[in-house]
Each structure stands twice: as C-alpha cells, then as structure tokens.
Amino acid sequence: MDKLVVEGGRALKGEVMISGAKNSCLPIMAASILTDDACVINNVPSLRDVDTMVKILMALGINGRKEGSVFIREKGPCRHVVAPYEIVSTMRASICALGPLLAKKKEAKVSFPGGCIIGPRPIDLHIKGLKCLGADIKVEGGYIVARTKQLKGADVFLGGHFGSSVLATANVMMAATLAKGETVIHNAACEPEVEDLANFLVKMGASIEGQATPTLRIKGVRALHGAEHNVIPDRIETGTFMLAASITDGDILLKGAMPRHIMALIDKMNELGSDIRTTESTIHVRRRKRNIKACTVTTLPYPGFPTDMQAQIMSLLSVADGISVITEKIYPERFIHISELNRMGADILLEGPNAIVKGVRSLSGADVMASDLRASAALVLAGLVARGKTSIHRVYHLDRGYERIEEKLIRLGARIRREKEK
C-alpha cells in the first residue's frame, strides 16, 4: 500500500492538462455492452476504476483493451450476464452494467456495488426505474438478479430523497435505448456526465432528446452499432487544481478544461478572492486578494455546487479569514475528512449536515488517513499549504479518481512523493 508525503509551503505555478472525466468514461464503457460492434473511446484516464471496468467487461465476455488514453472495445457479443462480487465490490459505478445487460441479454446478475464510504447510497432508484420498464428484479445472496421478456417504454420518475441520481439516470437511459416504445425519464440528472453518455448513445444509433435537462425522451430502437467518442474533461479534477492554485497562493493555467461545467465553483472562488479568467477550454487561476475570504457553501445537484468538491473547498476555507459554513445536501454523512483536517490544526465543528469552519492562520503537517476519493484530494490540498511534512496514508482511494496527480503537482512545483508503507 502506498502513501503520499507532501512538504507544504510552495506556491504552485505553471500549466496542467486536465484528464478525461472518470464519471463519464465508466458509464460510457458500460454502454458498449449494448452493441456487438467495436467501439473506440478517447480521452480515457489511467485510473484504477477504469481498470476495474475493463475487468467487468472481460468477465462478461467482452474483449477490450486500453492503449494510452484510448479504450477499444473489440467486436463480438456479450457472452455472460454475471458481474461478480470480487470485481464489483471495489467500485460504485459497476452498477452501470445492470441496465445495458438487461436490455441486451434480457437478464443480469450484478453484485451490490462498492466504492467510497461516504454514507448510505441506496440503489432503490435503479431498481425502481428498471422495474418501470418491465424488469423482474430480486436481491439474492448479495446480487441484483434481473430478468425480462422485453423491456417496454414507460414514464419513469427518478426523484430521490436527496434529488436526482446520476447513475440511476444512466442505467435507465441505457436500458431504454433497446426497450419497445418510448421512455420518458422525469427528474433526470442533468450532470454533464449524463449528457456525455447520452451523446455517445446517440452516436451508437439511439434516439434520445432532452440531454442536459430534467426530462429525457428515449425512443427504443432494434439495435445499436459501434461508435467513436471523446470523453469530456473531468470537472472535479479541474476544480481540485483550481483550489490548489488558490490555497497555495499560486498561478495555474488549466488546459483542456470545460469552464461551463464548473460555473458554481468559479462563482464561489471569485467570491473568495481568486482571479479566474476563462476561455472555451482553459481556466487561469491566481489569488486576487492576499487573504481568502470566508463564505457559505451548499452542495446541490448540478448545476449547483458539486458534492464531489465539498471536501476540497473545506481545506481552502480552513485557512480563510472568518467563519464559513458548508452544508452537505447530497450525502449528509460525507464529513469523515473533518477529523483528519482537525488533526492538521484546522478548527472545524460538525453540526448535523453543516460543517462550521473557523479559519486558522496556518495548518501543520501530520500523519492523516484518507477515507474516500475526494477526502484524499482534500488532504493533499491541506498538505500543500501546511507547515512541515504531511503523510497521507491509504492513497489507493486517490488512484481511483485522479490520473497521476503527484506527477502533475510536481510539474507545478509541489514537493510531493509516493512511498511504500512500511
């Protein structure tokens, strides 16, 4: 197992290229189950989660390989319908195999998914949506077992307790592409990753309208064909490097980004005192004011402030002037990183879904434990600004979602190295 050792106190400066979006490429790779033809997916990052999805496809009898930043799904049928526990248990997005398998093979057996521990993330909306299309679904021995004679289009409402669900929208949309008749998904997730998946499905021959809106209309077709697609830039990696510039009082140009996908963070960082200038594919970030201002942050479904940026902005606000309040409305229990930031000298109090962050003058290096993917990134940011040395343990979480993050940070001037745990 690896750890990252960060020596803080250096302003990050330079250029960084943003990788393809993890949360786009995983459902897109799963969508290749829907065809027997070859598919080519470009701008795929080198991540542990991508490797896991390749293993799932291979377990289903689909041959695929990654060459650099390109994933090639080879021509040939999906031969199996079981996505096994030993693979699926490591990644939440594995559930995306359920809808395509059901549509293509009329049956599926997918283990309950794993991933980060950030509070309960039920799959009830996935099951509800697929049942609306005519699937018979049972839970047996830790597996979701689904069968159907023929999926049929229907009106599907995907509103959950905390809003829409990205992966449930993806699953139902993929299944509906081969269903008989028209499916209308109400309260669909509007995230860019859902739009990206829809655009790939359209290239495959699907009939989809309403991309990036809460209402998706899918007319089922008899078959889908192969396609080539470029995955959108990762907006969460983008946001993480934007905050890295601000927290270190640095000056970073992010290339290959998509500013329109992260406007909520851009607006909030302008409020905090950052100077942000954008083009269609670049973001230039530097500190406008000497001190970071306190603020309030509330996570919401897209286009609101992303829950996947909550931990990272908490690191920044821990060294801001004044008291900030962060309210988590997507995953109210997603605050495990607070105790680790406090270990570094932050002053953060948790009150229900609210984190009260009292800014301190400086953080100090410490041994900390990464609890999940985005918390790992938050600890890296804290380490970049802390006095002394910070050792971040269990960084396998980080490798699931950030492509070569320490290499990118080193090129920006950070002192960071990867070491094997003793």
Image: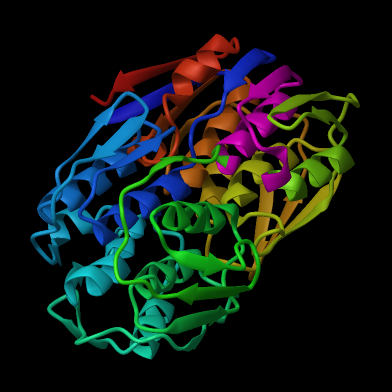
Residue 32 showing in the rendered view: yes
**Residue at 43% in and 80% down:** 125
Q: Give the range drawn in magenta.
A: 235-261
In the drawing, does residue 183 fall left or right of residue 195? Answer: left
* Residue 243 at x, y percent in the picture: 68, 33
**Residue at 35% in and 27% down:** 3
- Determine the image quadrant of residue 65: top left
* Residue 83 at x, y percent in the picture: 16, 62
Residue 321 showing in the rendered view: no
* Residue 149 at x, y percent in the picture: 19, 87
**As displayed, is residue 370 above or below residue 249?**
below
**As displayed, is residue 419 above or below residue 337?**
above
**Residue at 26% in and 32% down:** 66
Q: Does the magenta stretch include residue 3?
A: no
Which of the pair 105/358 is nearer the observer? 105
**As displayed, is residue 120 above or below residue 204?**
below
